[in-house]
């Protein structure tokens, strides 16, 4: 299906006749009745009278954002991870925008109440004329190969024994290449070479953009950072531990590395 984003941020009161996908979000949570993203008319979900804005289009139908807390069935965007990537991306966009509007009710410079832009995703201050946009935190994620092995680690924040590739936030003044080398060294004590870009993925946990790379092992012995990792090690491509779910950029990097190992 075709994904289209929309930056016309005009908010309107729902009459009940509007149709499409409904991203009903509050405090980083998403309304998922029956575990699914609602699709249909506003009236069928009792949304008439609520304020909404169109934030995109999926499969020819508009995607609406409603900033509202429902009494039950509020869940995480992660529950949509195994759906089509475009729909997951739009759901993540909605949750992030809802959080942005909630955290920018007042101007950080002069303290006056702000209003929404009618032409773009932004908050405006009518007093000092400051303009705020949603901020995105760039992250690098790196799959490291050594012959027929891949470096995988279990992060302290992960549950269930999932092992994945190394990742971290880009710091002020860094290039993506510098951030990749630094994060790998800090977390595993390994130096890398032949770094090459693969793809990117919006990652709404909470406001990241993952930029994915593959790299080759250069030198060093693994010594993992216990503040970040429970363990780290080299795994042969056909003897891998529990991996991240399909749909994640980490899983793609691992599968691409496995394909390289098989080909050689």
Image: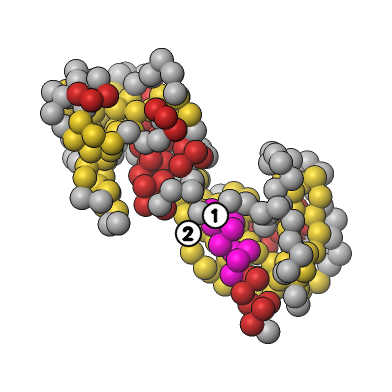
Residue 251 placement: quadrant: bottom right
- Numbered badge on residue 200: 2
Quarter holding the C terminus is bottom right
194 displayed left or right of 92: right
- Residue span colored magenta: 248-256
Q: Residue furthest front?
A: 34
Q: Badge 1 is on which residue?
A: 246
Element assignment for label 2? strand
Q: Is residue 124 visible?
A: no
Q: Residue furthest bottom?
A: 264
* Marks 2/1: CA–CA distance: 15 Å
223 displayed left or right of 33: right
User: x, y (%) of residue 210?
Assistant: 52, 53
Residue at (27%, 48%) from the top-left corner?
Answer: 58
Residue at (86%, 64%) from the top-left corner?
Answer: 221
226 displayed left or right of 55: right
Q: Residues within 10 Å of mark 2 (few under 14, many from 20)?
A: some
Residue 128 placement: quadrant: top left
């Amino acid at each position: 299906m075709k994904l289209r984003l929309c930056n016309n941020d005009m908010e309107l009161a729902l009459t009940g006749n509007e149709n499409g996908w409904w991203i009903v979000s509050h405090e980083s949570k998403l309304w998922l009745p029956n575990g699914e993203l609602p699709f249909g008319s506003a009236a069928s979900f009792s949304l008439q009278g609520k304020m909404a804005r169109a934030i995109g289009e999926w499969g020819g139908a508009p995607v609406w954002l409603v900033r509202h807390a429902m009494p039950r069935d509020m869940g995480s965007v992660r529950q949509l991870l195994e759906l089509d990537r475009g729909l997951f991306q739009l759901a993540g966009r909605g949750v992030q925008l809802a959080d942005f509007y909630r955290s920018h009710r007042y101007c950080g410079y002069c303290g006056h109440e702000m209003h929404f832009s009618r032409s773009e995703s932004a908050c405006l201050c009518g007093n000092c004329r400051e303009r705020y946009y949603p901020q995105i935190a760039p992250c690098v994620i790196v799959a490291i190969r050594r012959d027929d092995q891949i470096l995988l680690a279990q992060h302290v924040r992960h549950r269930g024994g999932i092992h994945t590739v190394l990742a971290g936030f880009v710091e002020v003044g860094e290039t993506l290449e510098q951030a990749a080398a630094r994060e790998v060294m800090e977390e595993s004590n390994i130096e890398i070479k032949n770094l090459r870009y693969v793809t990117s993925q919006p990652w709404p946990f909470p406001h990241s953009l993952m930029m994915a790379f593959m790299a080759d092992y250069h030198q060093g012995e693994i010594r993992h950072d216990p503040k970040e990792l429970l363990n780290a090690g080299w795994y042969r491509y056909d003897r891998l531990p529990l991996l991240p779910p399909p749909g994640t950029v980490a899983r793609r990097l691992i599968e691409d590395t496995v394909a390289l190992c098989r080909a050689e």
